[in-house]
Image (cartoon, grey):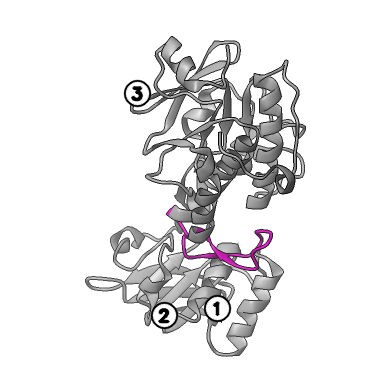
Amino acid sequence: MNFRNPATFAKIFKMTHTADILIIGAGPVGLFTVFEAGLLKMRCHLVDTLAGPGGQLNEIYPKKPIYDIPGYPEVLAGDLVENLMKQIAPFNPTFTFGERAETLEKLRERLYKVTTNKGTELFAPVVAIAGGLGSFEPRKPPIASIGRFEELGVDYIIRDPEKYRGKKVLIAGGGDSALDWTIVLADIAAEVTMIHRRTSFRGALDSVEKVMHLVEAGKVKLITNAQAVDLKGADKLEHVVVEVDDQGSYDVQADYFIPLFGLSPKLGPIADWGLEIDQNAIVVDTLDYSTNLPGVYAIGDVNSYPGKLKLILCGFHEGTLMVQAAFKYIYPDQKLSFKYTTVAGVNPF
């Protein structure tokens, strides 16, 4: 069967959604994979539970700057998604948004069917799982009153920093997200207080140094060996009760309390597909990021292997190698001719 003509393929098998590669997850790694597949003249269809492309970058922190994308000293997450969409536009990928990949069925050799929770059937010889952390929810601190103030001063995700302009903000956490947002909001909020349960931080040293400089400059208040234990307010949040080790507790005035303790990831239905799983991640072979199921690959934060780093740029690398292997899997009798884009350019189908 010639998979290079999806229209003919779809007509024969009465399938409305076909591609060479079905990508589960339209985050940055899934989007860049479309580009690499396009260079090899392979078409992609992407499915994502979110309403649009970008994954966590658009859903959680579109205005957050990213510093480790090659060629960009600094780029906003939302802008990176926009640039990726422009980059893949020549290859005309198709999308199914707002639906979750529910089941995986092997129809025959080199042909899978993925059905979504809304009954949409998607067909491809190769399935690439690029679902990031999978489905996720924020880790909430054990504060009895926190539910009362959700949407009334308690935020677990920062989508638009401008929301906090001129406000008093208290951020809890000691990882990269807490550090990065403390740095960003220092120039936006009227007052930023950061509390952490320890004196050491889990985030990048450069970010720690920047926060310390802001503390020395009086732009950020830092309270260590402390944690939020209660929230107070009438119709909305007004105070956060902070307990400091060996010093008791006191009220900190705040318009917003933002606990940034990370996300609790779940693979969801993918965990029932017969894939080898290790600590909520899919085990892959680093030769080509293949799973234990022939024709099924996993790239980005969703996979696991020795030395794994959950970085966007690592996902870009994984997607690049994966599509090379996918081409050989789909077309075992064809010779793969790799050409630099500086020589071959970027040509749509």
Q: Counting other residues with Cα less than 10 Å from the Cα at mark 1, is it few (<14), some (14-19), or many (20 or more)?
A: some
- Tell me the tag on residue 119: 3
Observer able to see residue 144: yes
Please tell me which residue is depicted at 76% across the width and 44% down the height of the picture.
Answer: 307
The relative height of residue 299 versus residue 116 in the rendered view (above or below) is: below
Q: Is residue 247 magenta?
A: no
- Residue bearing mark 2: 252
- Tell me the tag on residue 223: 1
Contact flag, marks 1 and 2 (Cβ < 8 Å): yes
Residue furthest to the bottom in view is 217
SS for callout 3: loop
* Relative horizontal placement of residue 296, taking residue 47 as reference (left or right): right
Observer able to see residue 279: no
Q: Is residue 70 magenta?
A: yes
Which residues, given as a range, are shown in magenta? Answer: 59-77
Please tell me which residue is depicted at 32% across the width and 76% down the height of the picture.
Answer: 238
The span from disc 2 to disc 3 (Cα, nearest Å) is: 50 Å
Give the quarter of the figure containing the C terminus.
top right
Q: Earlier in the sequence, mark 3 or mark 1?
A: 3
Q: Earlier in the sequence, mark 2 or mark 3?
A: 3
Please tell me which residue lies in front, 17 or 239: 17
The span from disc 1 to disc 2 (Cα, nearest Å) is: 11 Å
Q: Earlier in the sequence, mark 1 or mark 2?
A: 1
Amino acid on which the number 1 mark rests in the picture: Ile
SS for callout 1: strand
